[in-house]
Image (cartoon, rainbow, N blue to C red):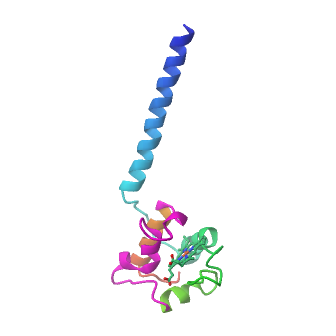
Amino acid sequence: MKSKHKISLFNISIILLLFITTGCYYDQVMPLEIEGDVSYSVDIQSFFDAKCISCHGGNEAPNLTSPGSYTVLISDNYINTSDPASSLLYVKIIAGGSMEGYASDTERAITLKWIEQGAIEN
Ligand code: HEC
């Protein structure tokens, strides 16, 4: 009786594990669909504040602190609105980019969406 109970708990953990790993797998493979307008001040700047400005706070280019990050990104050509996915800001944070480890899939998708929507200072 006791060992049977153990086995079923084990089975449940396996199922849970499969569920969790499959969830991660889909996160990476399926492009995230971001609904609505992305706001620079709300979405992008808060992403920089949380994940980037510890290094990009003035010493390391680009300076991603507020205010001023938007001007730096545009005038130093980190953004390419005619080919959003080739923007250096985006290329750096996606898989294979040297900043890959600092951004989540959602943050990558939001960044790309913001550029696709014209990279406006909204
Ligand atoms: C631990 C420090 C650190 C963090 C955190 C960090 N970066 Fe960087 N970043 C660097 C260094 C060092 C370089 C220069 C070397 C390189 O390009 O990989 C760099 C380079 C870059 C460049 C290219 C600069 C150029 O002119 O070629 C971009 C764009 C960039 N980072 C964006 C980001 C973004 C966006 C984040 C947050 C998601 C971030 N970085 C987080 C240290 C960091």
Residue 83 lies in the magenta-colored region: yes
Q: Residue furthest top?
A: 1
Question: Closer to the camera, 42 or 83?
Answer: 83
Which residues are the magenta region? 76-105
Position of 66 with respect to 36 (left or right) is right
Horizontal and vertical percent for residue 53?
63, 75
Question: Closer to the camera, 59 or 51?
Answer: 59
Residue at 63%, 81% in the rendered image: 65
Quarter containing the N terminus: top right
Question: Closer to the camera, 55 or 73?
Answer: 55
Residue at 48%, 83% in the rendered image: 120
Residue at 36%, 78% in the rendered image: 86
- Examine the image and state in which quarter residue 119 appears: bottom left
Horizontal and vertical percent for residue 97?
44, 70
- Examine the image and state in which quarter residue 88 appears: bottom left
Looking at the rendering, the quadrant in which ligand 1 lies is: bottom right
Q: Residue furthest bottom?
A: 75
Horizontal and vertical percent for residue 91?
42, 74
Q: Taking 53 as reference, is 1 above or below it?
A: above
Position of 45 with respect to 86 (left or right) is right
Horizontal and vertical percent for residue 51?
60, 68
Residue 92 lies in the magenta-colored region: yes
Position of 59 with respect to 118 (left or right) is right
Q: Taking 23 as reference, is 35 above or below it?
A: below
